[in-house]
Image (cartoon, grey):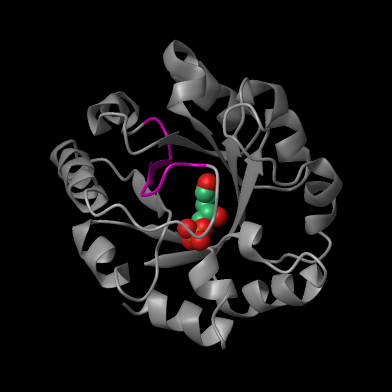
Amino acid sequence: MQIAPSLLSADFLHLEDDLRMVNDSADILHLDVMDGSFVPNISFGFAVLDQLSKVVTVPMDAHLMVVEPQRWFERIAADGIGMCSFHYEAARENTGEYIDRIHALGMKAGVVINPDIPVEVLYDYIGKADFLLLMSVFAGFGGQSFIPESVGRVKALKAEIVRRGADTLIEIDGGIGPDNAATVRKAGVDIAVAGSSVFKAEDPKAMVELLRKA
Ligand code: DX5
Ligand code: ZN
């Protein structure tokens, strides 16, 4: 399982140190972009994103928790970010079109849903999106507890991906740590986002390693 530490939980007063830790230990850097409208929180924007490629050597994954995500695809691509996901709840009938727009910009495209959206809405994008992101907490804040029902949702999505013979990856985001990493991997997760479990660990590198081998 690939591990994607979430920048949201990093130490913004010493960001470069945390980015180097991610370079040295992790597979992907996960970037939570929040606008205060789609979610009741604001994280960071292009003042931060524009700088990251100077230091970050692992692939970057922008998780757009914003209304009208399509307004930002070009700037995300220009920042050297290779994976871009947006919420189905923000895109609805435009989801297929947005996937195409992200692909046209040379990025991998992901579709995200919150825990209260039926997992079946993602089935239309199997084989079209490169990855499907199941939130295992409600988007908006780091440090929330994993919602156990997420495991069944992963299993259902994985079964449908296998049934269709597709290579679409499953990402999970929210409350992932040593207690549930093996469970979600066995259920079919390919990429696990981990914010507080990694950055609040005494030894973040060792925690990434532990989660990856779970
Ligand atoms: C929540 C974000 C997550 C968050 C994960 O809205 O999408 O990526 O940073 O943080 P933890 O791992 O602490 O739940
Ligand atoms: Zn996220």
In depth, the one of 85 and 136 nearer the eye is 136
> Would you say residue 106 sits in the magenta stretch?
no
**Residue positioned 65% across, 42% down in the render:** 33
Residue 195 quadrant: bottom right
Residue 16, by quadrant, is bottom right
* Residue 34, percent from left and from top: 65, 38
Spot occupied by residue 151 in the image (x, y as percentages of width and height): 22, 53
Q: Is residue 33 above or below residue 199?
A: above
Report the residue at 63% width, 37% height from top. 106
Tally of numbered discs: 0
137 to 117, vertically: above or below: below
Q: Is residue 158 left or right of residue 110?
A: left
Q: Is residue 117 found left or right of 210 in the rendered image?
A: left
Is residue 38 shown left or right of residue 188?
right
User: Is 105 located above or below residue 171 in the figure?
Assistant: above
Magenta region, residue range: 128-139
Residue 58 appearing in the image: no
Q: Tell me which residue sits at (27%, 61%) in the image.
A: 184
Give the quadrant of the N terminus: bottom left
Q: Please tell me which residue lies in front, 53 or 164.
A: 53
- Residue 55 seen: yes
